[in-house]
Image (tube, rainbow, N blue to C red):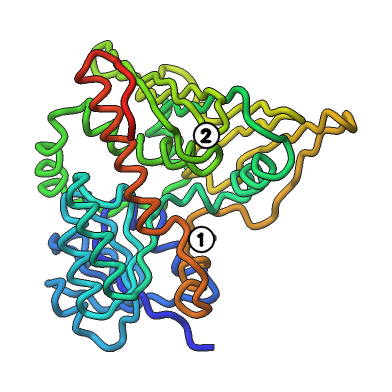
Amino acid sequence: MTDVRIGVLGAGRIAQSAHLPAISKSAGASLSGIFDPSPVLRAGACQRYGVPAYADVDSLLADDTVDAVVIAVPDRFHLDLASAALAAGKHVLVEKPLAGTLAESQELVALAKKSGLVLQVGAMKRHDPGVRFAAVAVRERIGRILSATVWYRVMSALRPEVEATYFPPMIVDEQMRATETTFKVDRGNYLLVTHGAHVLDGMRYLLGDPKELCARRTNIGNDYTWHGLATLAGDGLANFEITANVHSEWSEGAEIFGEKGSVKLCTPFPVTMAASGVEVFDEATGMIERPVFGDTNPYKKQMDYFVRTITEGIPADPNADDGLAAVRLIDAVNRSLDAGGVWVTP
C-alpha cells in the first residue's frame, strides 16, 4: 500500500520533538514537505529530513504529492490553516486545542463535516496504550463511577533538563520565539488552554461528558493552579486539577472508583514517549491487573491511527466533535471562574 504523504505546517518545538519523528517512524506515512514562515525553522527542518521547503502554505496545499497535513502551529492559526487544507482536499491532523476560540472551533467542525475529509485532533494521550486500556476498563469492568480524581502537574525547574535529555537538537529562531512570547502575556489563560485541552479531553475520554462543573484558580507568581469538580452522567463526582508549575517531579494520572473495582493511571512526562502505567482492581476476584506494553510512543501511534482513518475509513479519534467538546469545557471553566466558582453547564 502506498504511504499517506504528509505535509507539516509549522516547524517549531512540537513539530521537531514529536510530529516529524512520528512521521518518520510510522510504517504508513511519509513526509512530503514542510511549511513554516520562519526561514530558519523551515530550512533547518527540511535539511534534517531531506524534504522540500515551502515558503508559503498555498504552495504546499496545491501540491498533488501531499495527501494530508499536520498543523503544528499556535492555536490562533488553526481555523485558517485547517480550513484552507480542507478546501484543498487534504486530510488534517490539527494540534490541540481544535481552534483558538469556541466560535472558531464550532466553525471548523462545520467545515470538516461538510468536506467529508478526516479531521483528527492531536490529543495524543488517547493513543497512549495505558490510557486506552484504562478507558476500556472504566467502561466495561468497574461499573458506575462513584468517585474520580484526574490531575496534571507540570514540573518547573526540572522540565528543561528532562526535555534536553529526550528532545532531538532543536532548531530555534530567536526572533520568532520573541514574537510568540508576546502572545503569552495572559499567562493564566495561555496555560489553561495549552494544558487544559489535554486534561479535560482526558477526563471526557475516561469518564464521559460531565453534566456540570465548577472551578477555582489561584497563582503564586508564575505558578498557576486550577481545581474543579464535575458531576458525571451516572451521578458520580470527579475532581480535576491542572497545575503549571509545581516545584517537584512531573505528576499526572487518574484514580477512578466504581461499583465493582477501580482503575489507577500514572502517566509519565510525554517527551519520554513511554506508556502510562495502569492498574485495574477487580473486587469480585481480588485480582489486580497491570499490563505491559511494547510500542509506547503516543505520537507515533497517533500518526499510525491518522493514517488508518485515511486508508481504512475508521473514525478519527479524537474527532472534530471531541475537539469541540474539549474547548467547551475550557470555556466552562472560564465561565465558572468569572462568576466566582459557580456551577455551570458545558
Looking at the picture, which amino acid does disc 2 mark?
Ala
Q: Are marks 1 and 2 in contact (CB under 8 Å)?
A: no
Inter-mark Cα distance, 1 to 2: 33 Å
Q: Which mark is on residue 233?
A: 2
Q: Is residue 17 visible?
A: no
Residue 173 point in image, percent of width and height: 17, 51
Q: Nearer the viewer, residue 149 or 66?
A: 149
Name the residue beneath numbered marker 1.
300
Q: Nearer the viewer, residue 29 or 332?
A: 332
Please identify, in this view, whether the residue under mark 1 or under mark 2 is nearer the observer.
2
Camera-side residue of 23 and 116: 116
| Location of residue 272 in the rendering, given as x and y in whole percent from the top left corner | 52, 44
How far from the left and from the top, in percent, is residue 233?
A: 52, 34
The residue at the point 42 percent across, 26 percent down is: 155
Residue at position x 65%, y 32% in the image: 144
Picture layout, residue 283 above or below residue 247: below
Q: Quadrant of residue 117?
A: bottom left
